[in-house]
Structures are given as C-alpha cells and as structure tokens.
Amino acid sequence: MSESNGGGKPSVLLIDPMPPWTVERARKEFDLVVLPHESQRPPEFLANVERFRGIAMPGFAKVDAALMTQLPKLEIAACFGVGYDGVDGAYARDNGIIVTNTPDVLTDCVADLGLALTLACLRKVVEGDRYVRAGRWRTEGILDLATSPRGKRLGILGLGRIGLAVAKRAEVFGMAIAYHNRDRRDDVAYDYHPSVTALAAASDVLILTCPGGEATQNAVDAGVLAALGEHGYLVNIARGSVVDEAALVDALTAGVIAGAGLDVFAAEPEVPEALFGLENVVLQPHQASATVETRTAMGDLTLDNLRAHFAGQPLPNQVI
Ligand code: 8YV
C-alpha cells in the first residue's frame, strides 16, 4: 500500500453511486472519491487523479483507454455488476490492470425481472394499469384479451447463469425453452438454434441474457426482428448494445413485432421518445439487479475484490 492517500488507505475512484451504506463502508477502507457522470466532469477533473489505484464502477460505465491513461497507478477496475463491457479489456490486459465483477449474487433478481417483463408483455399488466387509471374500464369496458405464456416458445439468447435461471422460471409458466449460444451446451436438453435469426423465428418471446460488448453488438437487428414476427415479443435484460435500437423502434412502430419489455437501452439514461406512446412496450430504468438485497450483496462483493487486491490476497472474481 505504498501509493495511497487519506491516512494510508488505497485511493479508489467510484463511478456511479453504489448503495449509500456500501459507500459508507467503502469510505472506511479506502480514500474514496466519487467521479461525476461523464457529462458532468469538469475539464480540470483529470488534473488530480494520478493517485488512484482502483476504480469501482458499474460494468457498463465507460472506462476506456483515454481515461485509464490518465490514471498511471491504476491496478484494478472492480465492476459492480456481472457485465464488464464498459472497460477497455485490451487496454486493461496490455497494462496489467485487473478487472473483477460480481456474478451469481444477482442471477435470481435479474432472472425475476426477465420473467416479470415477459409476463407484463404477454398479460398486458402495465397496459391494464394505465387502462384503469385513465378511467377507460368504466367507459370502454374490458381490455383486449391478453396472451397466456403456457405452451408459448421462449428463445433465450445467451444461456449462461442468468439465462438458465430464466429458463427454470419460464418452465414453471409452461413455456417451451430454446436457446442460441456461440456453442451448443451439452448439459441441457433445450433445443439449440445455430443463429439468432433461427432462434427468433422459432420463438414467441425472445429474451436477451447474453453479455454486452463487441461480440454481441447489434446481434438483434432488423432481420432478427422480422424473423420474430408480428406475434413475437422481445425482452431485453442484457445490454442496450445487443439490439439495433433504431431498428427496434421501427419494428415496434410498424407492428413488425408484437411488443417489447426493455430494461436496458443503447444510451442510458436516454430512451427513444418514440417508445413512450406505445401501449405494447414496457420500459424499466435498468433495474434488474436493483433490490436492496442484491445491490447490498453486489456492493459487498465489489469491496471484497478491492480489499483482497490491496491486501495481496487471491481475488474472489477476477475476469481480466
Ligand atoms: C448494473 C448490470 O451493474 O450486472 C450488470 O451487468 O448491468 C447491473 O447489475 C447495476 O445496475 C449497477 O448500475
């Protein structure tokens, strides 16, 4: 701990606040400075950052080479989340910067929201709420009939930990599961499709649970949406970058697909305004892992990773 400030504590930059109780704990262990959101960083901010040895960040925050070169003492980027697509992995690898994440502790909550969005779309939960509040039940009678999940086909793009947890839940609702991964898994009996388009064509609901980043950028494009078809729904609990958002807006507006449940967007917190007036779209503010229980566990794991690193101990969750 030679390079430190704040009474010998290692200096850590925090991007995007973790739960306040986690931040409070972190302040006891680290010389912690909160880095303002990209759009709010004053130009002189980077003048005082040389001492930082760690970054704590949501995995989608942009920690690119331009930022990391300003931090000559950076040793570790500890992501608060399972994804770490915001970090320039090549730069981190080339410069010996460790990257950690917080897997497992969020799997159940993220899968829960995936099912909640699936059911909200099929069963018109949010649309029904708006219908009642607007007084339309009284004046127009019952809402149009919804769709049962039973017997419907759920296509999972990215059958990893979260995808499997989604599959287990969907089975309880009587859905038939299929998936697409880069490689077929030999430990599951679900139908495998060799491409995203083939999976979409065989799905009533296509749910995205794959990692973000270059490999999956715009994996769901206009062609995939056309294959999903006019009775198909898209649910995204992965990353906005996985979907060609302009194509999605066009598909929803033109009725190419039936609807969508979206927790993530290409340029958060910006959401295409064209979606605001669409009854068949359910929108969430990137909150799949956002329960007190899960965010506390994620915060604890983020601090565990930082603490282990600065103590020279094995890291619980090193990904780079
Ligand atoms: C965020 C996530 O980290 O785990 C992920 O990859 O996207 C989320 O859990 C969380 O929303 C913190 O901002």
Image: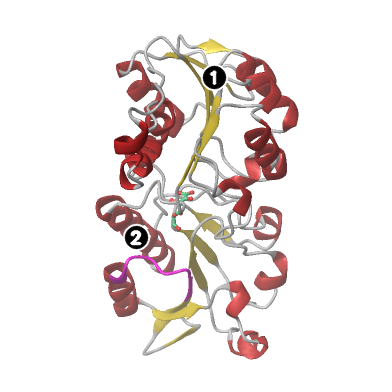
Q: Is residue 229 above or below residue 70?
A: above
Residue 215, above or below 59: above
Other residues around mark 1 within 10 Å, as few (<14) / some (14–19) / many (≥20): many
Residue 42's x, y, as percent? 62, 86
Against 156, residue 298 (above or below) is below
Which label belongs to residue 299?
2
Residue under pointer 1? 179
Q: Position of residue 21 (x, y in %)?
A: 26, 70
* Marks 1 and 2, how far apart at CA: 31 Å
- In this view, the residue in front, 237 or 158, is 237
Can residue 262 be seen? yes
Amino acid type assigned to the residue bearing label 1 in the image: Tyr
The answer to whether residue 221 is above or below residue 168 is: below
Magenta span contains residue 16: yes
The amino acid at mark 2 is Gly
On residue 132, which mark appears? none
Q: Which residues are magenta?
A: 13-20
